[in-house]
Image (spheres, grey):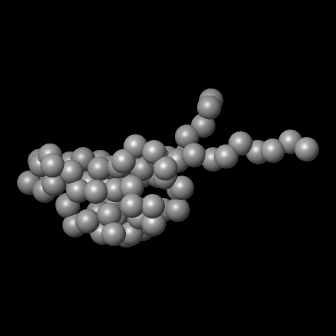
Amino acid sequence: METKPKKTFRCDIAFDECKGCSRCVEACPRSLLKLGDAINMMGFPAAVYAGEGCIGCGACYYSCPEPGAITIVEITED
């Protein structure tokens, strides 16, 4: 029986689109997001992704009020 490879994901955050509202931080069930120390061009501390562990649920994406600020990407070996 052939097993399917486990899907892996990452959360891409557009640094200068983030308004620093932290809704995504609160929505992430794995606590993989936090507000960073760097200030973006709008004057807000942008959210940052921890780097691994995203399950691709989209909670951060759907909670974000800024269209296009968060993208969930499936990582493939292609």
Q: Nearer the viewer, residue 59 or 30?
A: 30
Q: Residue at x 32, y 63 (%)?
A: 25
Q: Position of residue 49 (x, y in %)?
A: 35, 49
Outermost residue toward the right?
1
Decide if residue 59 is in sight here: yes
Position of residue 21 relative to residue 12, above or below, is below
Q: Position of residue 74 (x, y in %)?
A: 55, 45
Left or right of 53 on screen, residue 34 = left
Q: Nearer the viewer, residue 69 or 48?
A: 48
Decide if residue 64 is in sight here: no
Q: Nearer the viewer, residue 3 or 42?
A: 3
- How many numbered circles does the render carry? 0
Q: Position of residue 8 (x, y in %)?
A: 57, 46
In which image quadrant can residue 5 be found?
A: top right
Q: Position of residue 43 (x, y in %)?
A: 8, 54
Q: Quadrant of the image for the N terminus?
A: top right
Q: Quadrant of the image for the C terminus?
A: top right
Q: Residue at x 15, y 49 (%)?
A: 37
Q: Residue at x 49, y 50 (%)?
A: 53
Left or right of 39 on screen, residue 68 = right
Outermost residue toward the left?
43
Position of residue 10 relative to residue 70, above or below, is above
Q: Nearer the viewer, residue 70 or 30?
A: 30
In which image quadrant can residue 64 be found?
A: bottom left
